[in-house]
Image: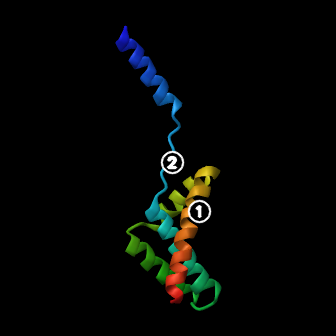
Amino acid sequence: MKIIFFIVLGCFLIWGCKKDEVIDIQLATMYAKFLLLHEKEKSEGQLSDSLYQQKVKILFAEQKISEESFKERISELQENPEVWRKFFTVCMRNYDSLKVSVHQ
């Protein structure tokens, strides 16, 4: 009887606990680098479109991720507003520290 009680209790605990989405720090850093590259190089007009695309390809190669995979993962995160907010908060922390290190 005790065994059944512990099994039922365990099931309730497992089902009752909400699993938090783990934020992918590497992806957040990659997104921050991508935003910084876009802001610094593209938006400020420092690079032509072709040179910008070359830098983007280099960034993806350095991070060992394809552009399609990156876009797909970002889209998945954006589907859940709470997860996206957490991800974007981590991303912006990385962005701010990257921006500071670039300007030094």
Q: Quadrant of the N terminus?
A: top left
Mark 2 vs mark 1: which is more N-terminal? 2
Q: Residue at x 58, y 56 (%)?
A: 86
For this orientation, the residue located farthest to the left is: 3
Residue occupying the point 54% across, 66% down = 91
Residue located at (50% from left, 64% from top)? 28
Within 10 angstroms of label 1, few (less than 14), some, or many (20 or more) residues? few
Which residue is label 2 attached to? 21
Q: Position of residue 29 (x, y in %)?
A: 48, 69
Q: For numbered disc 1, what is the local secondary structure?
A: helix
Residue 87, picture quadrant: bottom right
Q: Can residue 51 be spotted in the picture? A: no
- Judge from the rendering whether residue 83 lies leftward or rightward of residue 64; answer left or right: right
Q: Amino acid at mark 1?
A: Thr
Residue type at mark 2: give it: Glu
- Residue 22 at what x, y percent from top left? 48, 51
